[in-house]
Amino acid sequence: MKIRTIIAAACTPLVISIVGPISAHDGKTETVTKNFEAAIPNIPGKSLLAVEVEYAPGAASPSHTHAKSAFIYAYVISGAIESKVNDGETRIYRAGESWSESPGAIHPISRNASKTEPAKLLAVFVLDTNDNPLTTPIK
């Protein structure tokens, strides 16, 4: 029971920084919902965190970076997501497709590729347990 309390306390700052609706540049919204979180038992100081990001039709995330230690795997659950990481090509990923982001990556484009249909992705983070905030907008 005590270990659960320690893990929960360590992960709480991550959750606080990601849950809830977020306003996009064009006034439309994306919704970020925690799906899973746990300390990785055989890698002290590391955690696994998964969030679902739902984009309304035409919605976008502002340009951003993630926690400095975060390695991210993103998987499109439904719809189509337009994404660009660092200086890579801008690409549209459809349901069943995925990409990754290395620690320190800049994510200048992340948006629903459709103006009429919603889209959803699962983002899985492997990161230092106390590394936050999870997402930082670039101004």
Image: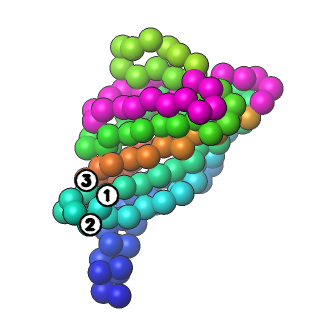
Disc 2 versus disc 1: distance between alpha carbons?
A: 9 Å
Q: Residues within 10 Å of mark 2 (few under 14, many from 20)?
A: few
**In x, y percent, where is residue 39?**
32, 64
Q: Per the image, is 118 magenta?
A: no
Query: Where does the N terminus fall, quadrant-wise?
Result: bottom left
Q: Check if mark 1's residue and mark 3's residue have beta carbons within 8 Å.
A: yes
**In x, y percent, where is residue 90?**
50, 14
Q: Secondary structure at mark 2?
A: loop
Horizontally, is 6 left or right of 52 in the view? Answer: left
Name the foreground residue: 71 vs 134: 71
Q: Residues within 10 Å of mark 1 (few under 14, many from 20)?
A: many
For label 2, the residue is: 41
Q: In the picture, residue 12 is in which quadrant?
A: bottom left
Whether 37 is drawn above or below 23: the answer is below
Kindly give the residue lying farthest to the left in the view shown. Answer: 44
For label 1, the residue is: 47
Q: In the image, what residue type sits under mark 3?
A: Asp
Tag nearer the camera, 2 or 1? 2
Part of the protein shown in magenta: 93-117
Of mark 2 and mark 3, the one earlier in the sequence is 2
Horizontally, is 133 left or right of 45 in the view? Answer: right
For label 3, the residue is: 128
Disc 2 versus disc 3: distance between alpha carbons?
A: 13 Å
Q: In the picture, residue 17 is in which quadrant?
A: bottom left
Whether 114 is drawn above or below 135: the answer is above
Query: Where does the C terminus fall, quadrant-wise?
Result: top left
